[in-house]
Amino acid sequence: MAEDQTNMDCAIQYNHENLKILQASKDHFGSHLKLEVTFPDGTIVIRWGLDDIDYLKIIDIVKSNYFDSLEKDYYFELMPYVVVSLDKPYGQQKLLANLRCIEPKKAAKIQFECSDRFAGNLEWFKKEVRCLQDLDHLRWEKLKD
């Protein structure tokens, strides 16, 4: 009975919160983000694999102090959506992902061009992931060094 309720809860469309970036790094498995994801049924820390190009763009953003202030309590979030822009010549699309830099008294959205793979993973997350169970295969404890 409890399992049926869990399956029903996971089937409900969920309006995703932003994914808190705990770490952006590389190891022998490759580039990745360590993300904290919150759902109604709890919080999970996952490993989100990255292409090297996406990693370099993200690490460039998160290693800098975006507001150029002395504030220590700031962090970054990955926003769970992608924007498509036709700014490139000949009508080619450009995929844009968004990070947020958050300080106690202000926040800013930082857009960056991302790979098809990164955009596809965000679309998968937004359309298919409903609860902790859907991300269990990416659980940090299962995939860390």
Image (cartoon, rainbow, N blue to C red):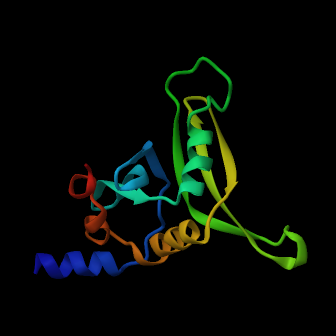
Q: Is residue 50 visible?
A: yes
Report the number of discs.
0
- Please state the horizontal and vertical placement of residue 120, each as a whole percent of the image: 54, 73
Based on the displayed image, in which of its 4 quarters is residue 139 positioned?
bottom left
| Depicted 117 relative to depicted 51: above or below | below
Q: Is residue 102 left or right of residue 67?
A: left
Residue at 55 percent across and 29 percent down: it is 104
Based on the displayed image, in which of its 4 quarters is residue 62 positioned?
top right
Based on the displayed image, in which of its 4 quarters is residue 12 positioned?
bottom left
Which sits in the foreground, 63 or 75? 63
Which sits in the foreground, 129 or 22? 22
Q: Is residue 35 left or right of residue 94?
A: left
Q: Is residue 132 visible?
A: no
Residue at 61 percent across and 66 percent down: it is 115
Q: Is residue 6 left or right of residue 26?
A: left
- Please state the horizontal and vertical placement of residue 66, each as a whole percent of the image: 65, 32
- Please state the horizontal and vertical placement of residue 35, each as a whole percent of the image: 40, 51
Q: Residue furthest left?
A: 1
Residue at 63 percent across and 55 percent down: it is 98
| Depicted 124 relative to depicted 43: above or below | below
Q: Residue furthest right?
A: 90
Image quarter hosting the N terminus: bottom left
Q: Residue furthest front?
A: 28
- Please state the horizontal and vertical placement of residue 112, each as a whole percent of the image: 68, 54
Residue at 48 percent across and 58 percent down: it is 50
Q: Residue furthest top?
A: 70
